[in-house]
Image (cartoon, rainbow, N blue to C red):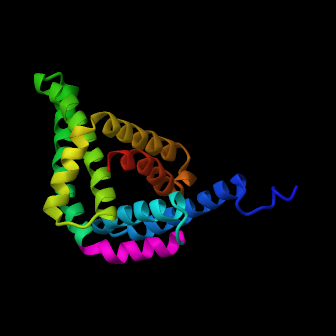
Amino acid sequence: MNQFFDYNNKVFRVLGGLADCLILGALWIVCSIPVVTMGAATAAVYHAVNKSIVHGQGYAFREYCTALKADLKQTTGAWLLWGILAAFLAADLVVTRQFLAQGSALGALYYFFIVLSAMALAWEFYLTAYMARFEGTIRESMKKTLVMAVANLGWSALLAAVFVLFVLMCNDTQCLIVLFPGVFALVKNYVIEKVF
């Protein structure tokens, strides 16, 4: 019976991890309201999950705030550059989907742009995680993470698929949105730390 109330019990560690995921999710949502800071908020969630939940060092709130403050400028710059690419890919998807609906031969490009968008999404996962963990210039970080995303296509496809699955789950059950950033950062940490 004494083991049940022990703070280091597996049940309490899982509940503590879920509570940290809720806190990090709420922080991510608030810090992502200005869309330009979404990349820095994502990197800060990754840093906090890696440090406080996975390695048990420090507190999630404090680690998040420290990482956000330290990496805001550089991560935001990389996020904006990636966002320009994502905007072009989104526009291509919209246009080629219209061609596909009309039965045009150019509609076949829609599937190409879906695959390219999934790769760009996986690149963003590597980029924010890399910038949370390592120091370097924006150009160097973007180049290295693009190589990582392409060299590890299996892991990249898995991350993109899990992300889409989480988004679909949040679409059906909106209350999961607060858990999504922290839980996905845990999944991302498990996959990306193998690559790093």
The quarter of the picture where residue 128 lies is bottom left
Q: Nearer the viewer, residue 110 or 193?
A: 193
Q: Can you see residue 13? A: yes
Residue 31 falls left or right of residue 121: right
- The residue drawn where x is 37% and y is 61% is 42
Magenta segment includes 29: no
Q: Position of residue 160 (x, y in %)?
A: 35, 40
The quarter of the picture where residue 44 lies is bottom left
Q: Can you see residue 86? A: no
Per the picture, the main secondary structure of the magenta-coloured stretch is helix
Q: Position of residue 172 (x, y in %)?
A: 53, 43
Residue 96 falls left or right of residue 170: left
Q: Is residue 89 above or below residue 67?
A: above
- The residue drawn where x is 44% and y is 47% is 190
The residues colored magenta run 59-73
Residue 169 falls left or right of residue 158: right
Residue 112 falls left or right of residue 171: left
